[in-house]
Amino acid sequence: MPRNAEVIRQWTILRDLESARRLTIDELAARTGVTTRTIRRDLEALQEAGFPLFDEVHENKRYWTLEQRAFRRLDDTGFNLAELSALYFTRTLAEGLAATPFQQDVRNAFDKLATALTPGMRQFLDRLPLAFQAKADPGVRAPAKPAGGGPGAKPDPRVAQLLDATLHHRRVEMRYHSFSSNRDKAYAVEPQRLVFAQGGLYLLAFVPEYNELRTFSVDRILSVSLTEDRFEPQELSEDAFAHSLGVHQGTPEPVVIAFEPLAGRYVRDRIWHPSQTIEERPDGGLILKLTVSNDWSLRGWILGFGALAKVIAPVELAAQILHESERTAALYINRQK
């Protein structure tokens, strides 16, 4: 079984034990869809990491429980173990505060929360393979060099169902409205991960019908139904969309773009992708080099610069940008006739 699935399963065991107070090994095995032998190994691994798990006999049955009182440092935080672990896990969301006055304060707050976790617990959480991932938006302002859902939003039941399906490896039947075709379609999918990116929530799921991973906008999922069928999760990298400026899968390739001076001032101050390099031009413009996939996120981003950006390579991308630009120009030409 993939290592990612193992860590997610162990996190699920922690959540189940805290919510149910106590469970037998058989009950944990039924909830996670694995053998009792696997559950025993998981419990041992969690104990070794420092999580306060204990077994006790009640009415001739042996139960496992998550003992909060044995974890003294939690009392000072006001959080229970699941809440504190979840908050520690979401610390990567603070990356969006780069170069703001709040960045260091937020980091300090997370560092203090982390002291309530044992080193083994922090190591375990650092390995958690992101059943829920936050992807930084391209164009985040680069950190300055040292000089010396909205408020009140209600929980979405679709998100809870999809996260449950992801954690417990349960197949899902859903109806989805496609943006490209403007039609509704029924899908049977195997949820792999929820990703927050570009101001929205996306589901990365394997679609057996097409034998491939696909990305679905949660906003366009019309209905969700969890089945009792289990699946073996895919082994995913930490960032499932590492090679995209958006939330797409694809093979990375070298991309070279020349920016005019007016756009260069804006482009050079931001981080568009970890692979980027910049070459300055004498006129104040620049050459930006990226290793990313050629998808709509990339093409839409380039088109947004209009005549201030020119694709140097690859030639296929340059042809696509030219085609889209001609289509846009035709809209205005036809309007004037």
Image (tube, helix red, strand yellow):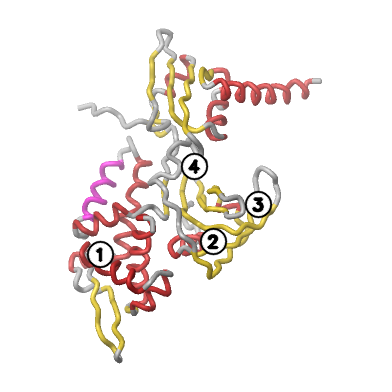
**Residue lying farthest to the right in this orientation:** 337
Q: Which residue is mark 2?
A: 158
Amino acid type of the residue tagged 1 in the rendering: Ala
State which mark lies toward you, 3 or 1: 1
Q: Residue at x 64, y 58 (%)?
A: 175
Question: Residue 250 location in percent, x, y?
Answer: 51, 38
Label placed on residue 45: 1
Disc 4 is placed on an element classified as loop
- Bounds of the magenta segment: 102-114
- Crowding around mark 3 (Cα neighbors within 10 Å: few <14, some 14 to 19, many 20+) is some
Give coordinates of residue 276: x percent, y percent. 39, 27
3D distance between C-alphas at marks 4 and 1: 36 Å
Residue 284 to residue 176: above or below: above
Q: In whole angstroms, how far apart are the C-alphas of marks 2 and 3?
A: 14 Å
Name the N-terminal-most of marks 3 and 1: 1
Residue hosting label 3: 177
**How many discs appear?**
4
Please tell me whether mark 3 or mark 4 is closer to you in this view: 3
Picture disc at residue 198: 4
Task: Say whether disc 3 or disc 4 marks the residue closer to the N-terminus.
Answer: 3
Q: Where, by quadrant of the figure, is residue 59 drawn?
A: bottom left
Amino acid at the residue labelled 4: Gln
N-terminal of the pair, mark 4 or mark 1, is 1
